Image (tube, coloured by chain):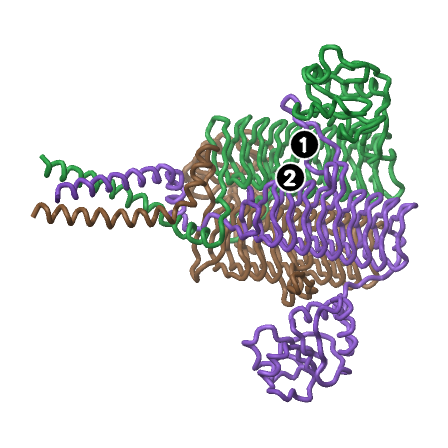
Chain colours: A brown, B purple, C green
Amino acid sequence: MSEKSFVLSELVALIAERSKNRLAMRIEGEGSVRVSRFMPPQHAGEGDMSFLSDPAYAEAMKASAASVLVMREKDARAVFGEALPARTILLCDNPYAFFAFASQFLYPVERVPGIHPQAYVEEGAEVDPTATVDVFAVVRKGAKIGANALISAGVYVGENAVVGADTVIYPNAVLYHDTVVGEGCCIQSGAVLGGDGFGFAPFQGEWVKIPQRGRTVIGNDVEVGANTTIDRGALEDTTVGEGTKIDNQIQLGHNDRIGKHCVMASCVGIAGSTTVGDHVMIGGAAMINGHITIPSGSAIGPATAVTGWGKEPKQLTGFFPALGMREFKLTAATITRLPEMRKELKSLQREVEELKALIRKGEA
Amino acid sequence: MSEKSFVLSELVALIAERSKNRLAMRIEGEGSVRVSRFMPPQHAGEGDMSFLSDPAYAEAMKASAASVLVMREKDARAVFGEALPARTILLCDNPYAFFAFASQFLYPVERVPGIHPQAYVEEGAEVDPTATVDVFAVVRKGAKIGANALISAGVYVGENAVVGADTVIYPNAVLYHDTVVGEGCCIQSGAVLGGDGFGFAPFQGEWVKIPQRGRTVIGNDVEVGANTTIDRGALEDTTVGEGTKIDNQIQLGHNDRIGKHCVMASCVGIAGSTTVGDHVMIGGAAMINGHITIPSGSAIGPATAVTGWGKEPKQLTGFFPALGMREFKLTAATITRLPEMRKELKSLQREVEELKALIRKGEA
Amino acid sequence: MSEKSFVLSELVALIAERSKNRLAMRIEGEGSVRVSRFMPPQHAGEGDMSFLSDPAYAEAMKASAASVLVMREKDARAVFGEALPARTILLCDNPYAFFAFASQFLYPVERVPGIHPQAYVEEGAEVDPTATVDVFAVVRKGAKIGANALISAGVYVGENAVVGADTVIYPNAVLYHDTVVGEGCCIQSGAVLGGDGFGFAPFQGEWVKIPQRGRTVIGNDVEVGANTTIDRGALEDTTVGEGTKIDNQIQLGHNDRIGKHCVMASCVGIAGSTTVGDHVMIGGAAMINGHITIPSGSAIGPATAVTGWGKEPKQLTGFFPALGMREFKLTAATITRLPEMRKELKSLQREVEELKALIRKGEA
């Protein structure tokens, strides 16, 4: 990761393009100022930007020596009054997103285009001349590597696999044959895409392997974390939609269909043939059953076992609370008595009703 | 994965051999028909096979244009009546197993025998001439690679490790020194076999590493999923029995002894020195304690924490139910009151008994 | 792993040095005896050592033919009486730690110093002449490899990364740029250190990647298990303290700060920005929330979800008990009734009080 510097107006133009003009930005003051990094307002100086996402910290911005302050217009007015000062302010309705986009330009992933002489690119593979294939990487015949893509050292790109433009694949990740990764993706080290789904036919107490013939197909702008595994489909494809962010050590089973712009924290496991809608958020270490459908907009808490779902989006959470050892042992032992306790409670309620009736009769 | 075609009678002969003649098959009609794939009955045509495993779909078979219908005899009789039609029917008591076995021949794992010039095979390693050692793979001295085995790109086979005939090891998997993998196994990418077991001696509040001198020994026909880790034993071996199927991201600790024909879904963890019998089924993300024995034929549900077991095979399951957020918070808070509630309930039962006695006395 | 032999007095001197003279050891008898392995007392003979950590087995030591007996002084006196016999006894107050230290010398990790001709060491990397860089390993410019360090086959050491003296990194592990690993560490295969933390800015229902600019910094004598992932920090570093032992398939999020001499069993996940003190023990598959602080000396049970903590060190455990299938279904269904049951119980208590009052009034 190298550090670069930009003239602010040029940086804004780059961000406008990458955000597809959806991030509203306006420069108040000098757009020709040169910037190279973000710093907290109290430590910022010449060439630095500071951004304000929490209005509680607005006052620190006023005193900051940063070359550029990134703020919402209403926060800027609150700090500086109606007449903004001559110093450069980048007015933006989402300063945190500005920080993210700008950082992508300031701290780009380094690459040296071309095929390393000690890489292995098989005849019949297509590597864009602007792409990088690093030392000891393997690209099989029929595979296609898009413009500016980075295939790092030790990565394996199987036969007929496709890697989209601008995608970065970190060292030692593996793409099995026919795997498709979209544009602008980031695949961390040790991720395995397109491994065999877990499919076996039961046969006389044994298990006969069923070759897995579907693919793993990843949309654009997807993040796949380190050592995450996304199995290929049995017959149809396992798919991950555009913009979905998948953390480390996540397991997606064969024929899973994950929607767009989802986010999954680390250690999640989703069994096979489950469909997850768009904009679903899944907490770390959640465990999700196979063959279910989770509607768009749903949310699942951490460490939650999901075995089914209704038709509606909702939020589900559930894990045993952490307790002191003695308390846990007592509680765990009592839990198994719950159904019995419920019966006893119901029976007691009836008895008390009978007693009340008896007493009323006695009083009468 | 390439697609091949077979004359039906030859395919049946190959399956008979691979299934050790345990799969009953009989061709009604023309055995010389050529087949190359499976298709659902309604989409099947010339050269296709369709199989019926669920009798509910029997009618679709009748109308199918498939070259070969694979059915149980009783289903075939039910569909076509006593006189089977002239078209080719493969009568088989387990059509789904037939599909699995046949698919293995129709969609074999591709390999080009021989040692790639950019592989590294150390002097003193034995590689069968029919085996494949692909680019950037490493085979250390003393290691033995069996007939038709496939050591894919970037795989590491340590000193004195053994890979059995027909076994496939996918890219970037690692076998530490002395690891043994049987015949006909399938080791997915990123799997690590024979890493050090987690063994340390406590010493003045610190931990002193104990070199792990046992091995990891995997039987025949075992599947090991992507990024699964199976540690070597401390002194004795960690073992996995014949035919056991292990999904992705599973962790087996040192000195575990896993039986034959077990199946473990993804994300299971088994701590060290645990023994699992034969034909045990373990659901995804189950967490199993060390130093316990799980008898043959047992089953463990998903996301279940197993801390002990009795002598008998049984089925165990347990996870906190997923609830709406408000419901979860209330329930989790109440759970810690369970032991207290139980006492209160018992005390209330006694009081009600006393009241009843009092009233009976009053009535008398 | 090779087997070596040592003169006992030399072995003791080596252990004294490695343990920083903190392990009290005294040879009774002949210090020039040569030893090469440990064996159980009943199977030990010439050249073998046997150690006694559990006094229950003391009698077996008396009859043992081992060349050297390793015992606490009080156990030796109990077995042999005040006058110790002429045979060699190594008196040591922690025989198990002696076993661990001695085994490190008897079964060292093999290495051949030097850079393998098929390794790739970039110009500008510094590799100590006593270090090993094995075949197909990659060491980028600016990286430093310390004395006697072992960079195994297929390992990736990124730009400006540092590997301390005596550290062993097993095949196919990955260290991203700027990662620091201390001295005497052991990094198992498939571990990924310094992958991007999971940081995204929300933007119109989508997620914008934030480049992760911190590092992963690992102290001395740390173990990192196979396929474990430790993400780099967002701005500050993710750190693991000296002597901490981390098992397989563990996930540490960005900005985590793990203390010294902790131990974490396999499959643990810790979300980002959590601080763990020193000497903390964490059971397998425990799941720990982000942005919390766990004080030194705390302990967390297996499969426990930790969402918060107080100021004090304590032990927490909690997981749903494993039950028979019918019992589990009943119990899980009843759990959601718990808050209602509690209310009913309270209401019933009041009613019984009222009844008692009524009856007392009736009696009066």
Spot occupied by residue C235 in the image (x, y as percentages of width and height): 60, 36
Chain assignment, label 1: C
* Residue situated furthest right in the rendering: B123
| Residue A245 appears anywhere in the view | no
For disc 2, the neighbor class at 10 Å (few under 14, some 14 to 19, many from 20) is: many
Q: Nearer the viewer, residue A358 or C100?
A: A358
Spot occupied by residue C262 in the image (x, y as percentages of width and height): 61, 30
Q: Is residue B56 left or right of residue B84?
A: left
The amino acid on which the numbered mark 1 sits, given as a three-letter code, is Ile
Residue that appears at 76% across and 31% down: C167
Q: Which mark is residue C230?
A: 2
Q: SS for tag 1?
A: strand
Spot occupied by residue A137 in the image (x, y as percentages of width and height): 79, 51
Location of residue B347 with respect to C57 vertically, above or below: below
Q: Nearer the viewer, residue A307 or B180?
A: B180
Indicate which disc, 1 or 2, sits on the residue closer to the N terminus: 1
The amino acid on which the numbered mark 2 sits, given as a three-letter code, is Ile
Q: Is residue C64 left or right of residue C342?
A: right
Location of residue C297 with respect to B350 vertically, above or below: above
Quarter holding the C terminus of chain C?
top left
Do discs 1 and 2 belong to a common subunit?
Answer: yes
Q: Nearer the viewer, residue B37 or A239?
A: B37
* Residue situated furthest front in the rendering: B364
Q: CA distance from mark 1 to mark 2?
A: 10 Å
Q: SS for tag 2?
A: strand
Label 1, on which residue?
A: C218
Q: Is there CB contact under 8 Å for labels 1 and 2?
A: yes
Q: Which mark is residue B47?
A: none
Quarter holding the N terminus of chain C?
top right
Q: Is residue A57 left or right of residue A21?
A: left
Chain assignment, label 2: C
Location of residue B11 with respect to B86 vertically, above or below: above
